[in-house]
Image (cartoon, coloured by chain):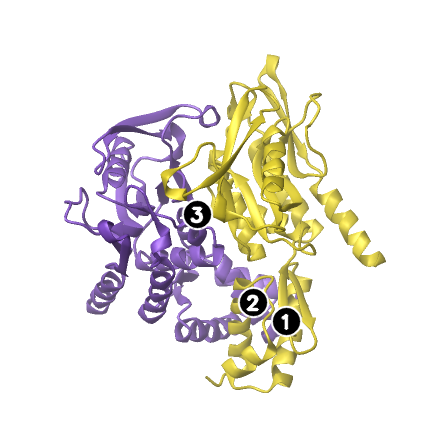
Chain colours: A yellow, B purple
Amino acid sequence: MKLRRSSRLVDMTGFLLQHPHQIIPLSYFSDRYESAKSSISEDLTIIKENFESQGVGRLQTLAGAAGGVSYLPCMGCAEAGRLLANLKEQMTDAGRLLPGGYLYMTDILGRPELVNSIGRLIASVYADDQIDAIMTMETKGIPLAYAVASQCSVPVVVVRRSSKVTEGSTVSINYISGSSRRIQTMVLPRRSLKENARVLIVDDFMKAGGTMKGMMNLIKEFGATVAGMAVFVEKKDEQHKLVDHYVSLLKLSIVEQEDRLFMEEGNVVDYMRSREAEREHV
Amino acid sequence: MKLRRSSRLVDMTGFLLQHPHQIIPLSYFSDRYESAKSSISEDLTIIKENFESQGVGRLQTLAGAAGGVSYLPCMGCAEAGRLLANLKEQMTDAGRLLPGGYLYMTDILGRPELVNSIGRLIASVYADDQIDAIMTMETKGIPLAYAVASQCSVPVVVVRRSSKVTEGSTVSINYISGSSRRIQTMVLPRRSLKENARVLIVDDFMKAGGTMKGMMNLIKEFGATVAGMAVFVEKKDEQHKLVDHYVSLLKLSIVEQEDRLFMEEGNVVDYMRSREAEREHV
């Protein structure tokens, strides 16, 4: 249909937001709106300026036959800081302490607007990397993994603790839980991950990192590569972590004798700043 | 900041899409853009026309002191039909058949763009109802539940098969699986559902409906109400279903002797049409 600029802007904005990390040929829009490519380019300039000034993300224009425009969701460091401050405040509540050094966060992870914001933040961290899939361990990491995957337009693979009749043939490995030192099993359907895929691991909580380490081994078992690791809350303690090079949003300390907890920001904003600096040096 | 109409349209579109089912006072936008309310109203008219003609959803304007504008995601019957045809095609593959009359659909449910479309369809069905929470049973229903919840701006509560250390005190009930006739348990954290909440149940697969029936009983146990039930795939067979008044997207039939499966559309589009007719009669 033929549309005026104002209607094109509304429609293109919605379309781009719903198709992150996908290259949309300009001809798609010019056909859709029966408009000249020059008009579409002007529309995109307006959208680009708005997205960048509002911290929504970047619009990348790629020239050539395979060219087009691609929207990369990017949360700025300022917005990331506000989100972390908000999460930190909601999480700092002694009522959340559970036996065994765990934290009740089912309510936080049950709210889609928070989960989607966390997903947008994690996707921003890896916006310049090639990511082919998001991996998580059942159950609580699943919403976060989908929130990240929606912003990256890639599939999610969910690792399970035991094989299920609904998943066909599976690959399983044993791993040692870093905190309890127990041997556990993790299972992934054979057809869920391709060789050489670049996989971003996302999880809700990390103590010593045994589960993360297990997922890294599982990814190797499939001939795939770990592209990154991001965790919502990590437990800060003297215990040596089994993994490094991960990004965390929040760090939890517990004073068990006093039933008190402390939350501080993880390394995510520092990591974003260093990636930004790298980009500027290229 | 002061913005021109074109930039306002981009920004407002993004904002509305990210805040479905929330009443945004016009003053929020007029303050945000340092613009007169009359200009904001004109912007909203442009967005409304576009959303409605493109089948994105409705913009409802509420007058008065508590007034404002609210975006209700609504997929039209035509788009719903195309989505169902696409899903039906992808699901009709004998390779998906698993022992016990189950279906491999982990790949489909792993793709966020499909999951989000299914979520938008289910949210559209209940767009005019008051929904306070989405409930699902772990594990495979979780992504669908979040996709619906994101479009309704309400929290998700995940029912588990056993109580977890990370969830605090819980309420559990026993139920009888409709297909295997075994006694099973379902568990929900005590603080996860409020009395009188109106709950929409969402799940990925339904055989006889025992799990659905269990969730209905669990909702009653909390003094809450079932606002609706939606399932992605239901198994079509002679077996009597334990629940009614549910909506299904697809219906699966299996010819076990021949290792063949048939998929047909569920009742969702018919249900949408009847709701639409009701609305027009009011």
Q: Residues within 10 Å of mark 2 (few under 14, many from 20)?
A: many
- B22 w.r.t. B176: above or below: below
* Chain identity of mark 3: B
Task: Determine if residue B2 is in view.
Answer: no
In the drawing, what numbered circle is on residue B143? 3
For discs 3 and 2, the disc positioned in front in the rendered view: 3
Question: Which quadrant is the N terminus of chain B positioned in?
Answer: bottom right
Q: Quadrant of residue B188?
A: top left
CA gap, disc 3 to disc 2? Answer: 22 Å
Q: Are marks 1 and 2 in contact (CB under 8 Å)?
A: yes
Question: Residue at (57%, 38%) from the top-left corner?
Answer: A203
Name the spot of residue A100 as percent of width and height, x first.
54, 19
CA gap, disc 1 to disc 2? Answer: 9 Å
Mark 1 and mark 3 on one chain:
no
Q: Amino acid at mark 3?
A: Pro
Q: Amino acid at mark 2?
A: Leu
Q: Are marks 3 and 2 in contact (CB under 8 Å)?
A: no
- B47 w.r.t. A35: above or below: above
Q: Secondary structure at mark 2?
A: helix
* Chain identity of mark 1: A
Mark 3 and mark 2 on one chain:
no
What residue is shown with label 1?
A: A69
CA gap, disc 1 to disc 3? Answer: 29 Å
What residue is shown with label 2?
A: A16
Name the spot of residue B138 as percent of width and height, x first.
39, 38
Question: Residue at (17%, 45%) from the top-left corner?
Answer: B241
Q: Residues within 10 Å of mark 1 (few under 14, many from 20)?
A: some
Left or right of B84 on screen, residue A107 = right
Q: Secondary structure at mark 1?
A: strand
Left or right of A56 on screen, residue B147 = left
Q: Secondary structure at mark 3?
A: helix
In this rendered view, identify the residue nearer to me: B59 or B121. Answer: B121
